[in-house]
Image (tube, helix red, strand yellow):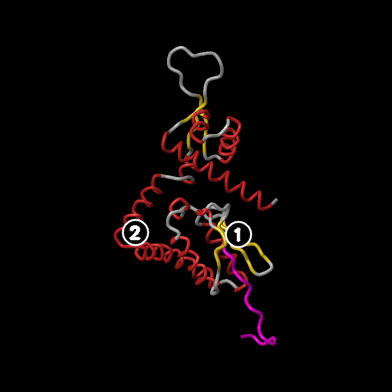
Amino acid sequence: MKIASRVAEGTDGRTRDRVARLLLERGPSTAAALAAELGLSAAGIRRHLDAMLAAGTIASREARVYGRRSRGRPARLFVLTDAGHAQGPTTYDDIAVHALRYLAETGGEAAVRAFAEQRVSAVEQRYADLVEAAPEADRATVLAEALTADGFAAGVRSGPSGLQLCQHHCPVQHVAAEFPQLCEAETAAFSRLLGTHVQRLATIAHGDGVCTTHIPHAPAPVGGIPQ
């Protein structure tokens, strides 16, 4: 059930991203227009719109009628709120994708990788003092707190073979979907910050509900003698 729930959350999130993108591109739209564009039923689009209204990413208003009003309830228009603009896909995504495509065409994959590493290095430097000052057992939690402060909604949970660092939001997911070098550079930075090998198990950019990084437990000392 947990896996099914996670898959459903990921699917719902992608659909709501598409709703946000349509509202961004086309402006105020009715539920019927959105449903037709996305191939959803009236009940299906209503479920997503209700969730987005509750989250505060969209708002609704009565459509202005010019001339004589027909019978029945007036149509309602849905629009992105400021929170929706900040959280959802924006035209900056398209600009970033086009810029990275140009970089890839002119400089090759190595240039894209260098850009990704340079981008994450500034973040890594900001996190380094916080993580290094924490006790080793708390460093993953401190890293998650720093990520949350930067909008990644991160947390840590324990598993039989180690910890899982989970990021429930990715501000660059639409760009990273085409350029996984961004995710790879971030994973490498996590490894350096935590001083251990880590493994990325899932990413929002690839359609998963959450970005998950596995942090293995430190090996036990041999014979009880610290290494």
Rendered image quadrant of residue 47: top right
Give the x, y percent position of residue 203. Answer: 53, 57
In this view, the residue in front, 34 or 73, is 34
Rendered image quadrant of residue 40: top right
Mark 2 sits on what residue? 104
Question: Mark 2 and mark 1: span between their CA atoms?
Answer: 33 Å
Give the x, y percent position of residue 92. Answer: 39, 48
The residues colored magenta run: 213-227
Q: Secondary structure at mark 1?
A: strand
Q: Secondary structure at mark 2?
A: helix
Q: Amino acid at mark 2?
A: Ala
Image height check: is 63 above or below 127? Answer: above
Image height check: is 138 above or below 155? Answer: below
- Is residue 175 magenta-colored? no
Horizontally, is 46 left or right of 103 in the view?
right
Horizontally, is 24 left or right of 194 in the view?
left
Judged by depth in the image, the label closer to the viewer, 2 or 1, is: 2
Q: Amino acid at mark 1?
A: Gly
- Is residue 224 magenta-colored? yes
The residue positioned 50% from the left and 65% from the top of the image is: 187
The image's mark for residue 155 is 1
Q: Residues within 10 Å of mark 2 (few under 14, many from 20)?
A: some
